[in-house]
Amino acid sequence: MRLVIGSDHAGWPLKQAVIDHIRSLGHEVVDVGSYDEKPVDFPDIARAVAKKVTSGEVARGIMVCGTGVGASIAANKMKGIRAAVCHDVHSAHQSVEHDDVNVMCIGAQIVGPWLANDLISSFLAAEFSTDEDFRRRVQKLHEMDAEG
């Protein structure tokens, strides 16, 4: 799978460990920044991640910021994005299985590298359910997106 990853300065220290883990699973990673600890505005990075996902250039995105919350809010402002903060393995896979989440946001100040690796493995292994109820609900999200 081809993925995009982005981080703000608070997520930057964890980002390389995340990239290394994703590559160890056999996936390709497109890194849209940040590239050092210098302050950067998370909405700018979230926009770059979202554009790669909605263009179809990548299958899914991962955002790493301090808590994951700001990244999630920013990513969800972009049409076609369903982003979720995931700090537990169950949410990491169920967000994809039930809600077809295409951007996972994690907080570097909340989780360490070991948990981040587990979250990412769970997120990437998950597939959107074929259950009619989940499909209907996500279709309603698409309709809400189209309303603006």
Image (tube, grey):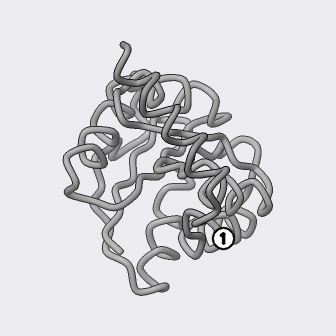
Circle 1: residue type? Ser
Location of the C terminus (image quadrant): top left
x and y percent of residue 108 in the render?
65, 46
Quarter where residue 79 is shown: top left
Residue visible at 40% across and 57% down?
A: 60
Question: Height in image: 124 above or below 24?
Answer: above
Considering depth in this image, is 107 or 77 the residue closer to the camera?
77
Q: In the image as oriented, which residue stretches furthest toward the top?
A: 148
x and y percent of residue 59 in the render?
34, 61
Residue matched to label 1: 122
Considering depth in this image, is 61 or 112 the residue closer to the camera?
61
Residue visible at 20% across and 57% down?
A: 57
Quarter where residue 23 is shown: bottom left
Residue visible at 66% across and 41% down?
A: 85
- Describe residue 107's horizontal placement relative to residue 75 as left or right: right
Question: Height in image: 148 above or below 19?
Answer: above
Residue visible at 54% across and 42% down?
A: 138
